[in-house]
Image (spheres, grey):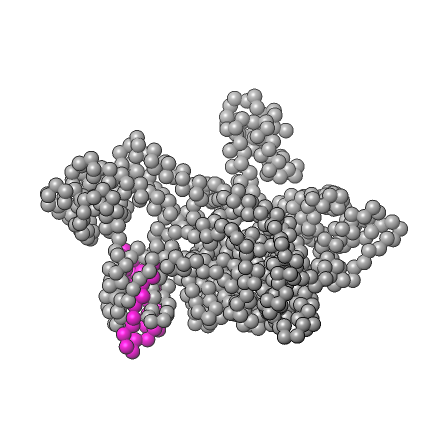
Amino acid sequence: MLEMYTDNNNTEIQKQQLWTAIVQAKQDGLSNEEIVENVQEALPEAMISYAETVLKQIDFRAKLSRPVVEFNLEFLFQVIYESVIAGTNDDEILSICAEHCTLNQYEFVRYALEYIHLNRMPSQWEQHNVYQKMIEIVSISPIESLFEYIESIKNIYLKQIGYKVVQENLYNLFLSNKGTGYFTDLANKSRDNFIKNYCCRTAVLVARATGKPLDLKMTGNGSILLKEPKYLDREIANNEIVSSNILTMGQAGKLLVDTLEDFNINAKYVDAKNGPTFNRIRVKLGRGVSYKKVEDIGNDLVQQLGEELGLKVAPMVSVVPGGVVFDIPRLDRQFAYFRDYFTFDGEPDIYSVSIPGGVDVDGTYVEIPLYSDNVTHILGGGRTRGGKSQFEKAAILYLVRRYPPSVVRLALSDVKRVTFGKFDGLPHLVAPVARDAESTANLLDYLVEEMELRYQEFERHSSIETISQYNSRFAPDCVMPRVICLIDECFDLLSDDNYCDRIETALMKLLAKAGGAGIHVLLYTQRPDKNVIDPLIRSNFPAKTAFVTTRPEDSCIILGDDKDKRAVYLLGYGDFLYKTTEVLRLQALYVADDEDPEYFQQLLLEAKNHNDPYTAWKSGLDFDEFVASLYGESRSNDNGKFKATTATKTKQSKTDFEGSFSFKVQLDEEARNSIMNLHQKGYQLDEIVKAVFNLSRQDGRSYKKFRNVVEEFLNNFKGGGEDDI
């Protein structure tokens, strides 16, 4: 299709022709990967990047080109974020949104773009490119050009890279014997207060070295207060340029205490800790001073101490043994990468299964022990970009890489279809990843039956009541594996009219006694609605993980305390509260599966090829047979034809379809509606078959037959046909 354009030397005409060809290819049902492969084979390398950009724009437009009047704002934010990360420029996003969104939503899009550019965490690749760009600027232009480039950057993390380059170059200029006036002039030329302070500090160093007096008022910024350096050693002086305008933790603590006095709150500074996400200042309130007086003082501190402490959002205020702590967000925030904390050397502890928690304020790694009576089940939630999905992926990746299938099994539900799909095919799974309410209900019912069989096994052995006691007696010769059931976005499941009752009933049974049998439920949602998640369900979770929430009431629901609104003050991107008998604020581990896919795939491959030296206890309950029994399904051979519906979409039905006899598929109303909805949303034929029938190319003949059925149904629909297929 694309070869006809290779001889055209006019770039603009070539791009227009390529755009037309790609649109036609998409209409013909080709996937993005197939189109890119075509382009790579037929066109010059320079056109490949343009083709990828065109595909991103088409995908973004398709996501918003649905016949709806109002978009869910969380959906809209997610689509915008994905498009920004994919490289779509702001003008293109705004142009498409102006066409499809209401005025109020368009305004939301503008603010969302600004927020994303400011707060998103750039990839390692992007950070490296920005750093190289800055180095190139200072190598061929005056340092003022670097100042202008940094001022044009919106993202706070990329600005931090710029500040480090500025500091390095200012020190080199200091060594080249530039005068004080040079650096004060630089300060006047910059609109960035951080750069102004760095320049002024360097001027102080020059004045100290030359013995000349310096009047800092000449900078036009009389508010800058800088101490004279104690040393002129190369490394120490460079560090002083960097840190002189940043208060020490002791100074920040004294300033905080003095400000509290202004609010008639008597307090005494105790100590401070430096964490990866925030710095924690602990104070002791005076006798008779109630915590309620400081509980909601965060916004007042932003107003009073915003410049001195670098506060852009209200700090979280909490009670701890021996005082009250104020968590001050760090501008130079650090992320805790998954790969930096695990090597997976040595044998796993099969008696104490745990998942990664995160990094504490003092840099200590904290794990979440599922074997502990204070954990067993976990309720969690938080808004988009809070880090919930990264936390879930870190837990799964750690479990499958650390423990063999005889020790840990997984039951996963992902109705969003984007979080857990990468883990399909692992030997640890008790069933394929559930992607809708029906398959999730089947999965939970199966776990309830598995739980009962385990307790029957305990009953056969006197004095055994829990999985810990069982494994203490029989492992490693016979290990009863723990089953971790992780459900993402339970709101959609519990608001499904057809299956919510089944799901609620199964959850209540599991939460009541499954922990002792080694079955652990981890339930997560973006919308912790108290009218959807039953209080009986919420109250049976001994452990909570609250990521940043939009509303104070969401924080109260997740943490199980009507007065605990602290999750509102979290900083997103993995900053969360872990609550058991106490509440810890942790920075979750970042898997970085999009930035470092090779490492992620390597761990998955190692998990699939896991050396499993143990013998697992088996209940004898087969998932496929259990689901088939739920619906009373049986194999029939009526005149050589096998009739199947979409009532269940399980491996059992797939296996039956592989028989040597022919079969006819009759689409029921639910299947027809699902196919049409997905088709109208722009899903490809392969994606529709996967979503509705849980079949992929690896399923061979079954996949091909179902694909033909769906294709024929869509063709008949376009032609106005009404007959069953």
Vertical placement of residue 659 versus 507, above or below: above
Disc tally is 0
- Name the outermost residue toward the right: 639
* Magenta-drawn segment: 279-308
Drawn side of residue 104 relative to residue 188, left or right: right
On screen, residue 269 above or below 593: below
Point 56% across, 42% down: residue: 59
Front-most of 717 and 331?
A: 331
Residue 29 position, x and y percent, is 65, 39
Along the viewing direction, whichever of 304 and 477 lies nearer the viewer: 477
> In the image, is residue 305 part of the stretch drawn in magenta?
yes
> Residue 571, image x and y in percent?
41, 57
Q: Name which residue lies at 40% across and 39% down.
A: 128
Q: Residue drawn 27% across and 38% down?
A: 169
Q: Position of residue 384 (x, y in %)?
A: 49, 55
Residue 195 falls left or right of residue 679: left
Up-down: is 314 above or below 179?
below
Q: Say whether residue 69 is visible.
A: no
Q: Residue at x 56, y 21 (%)?
A: 7
The answer to whether residue 167 is above or below residue 266 is above
Residue 152: give x, y in percent of width and height: 34, 42
Q: Nearer the viewer, residue 580 or 457?
A: 457
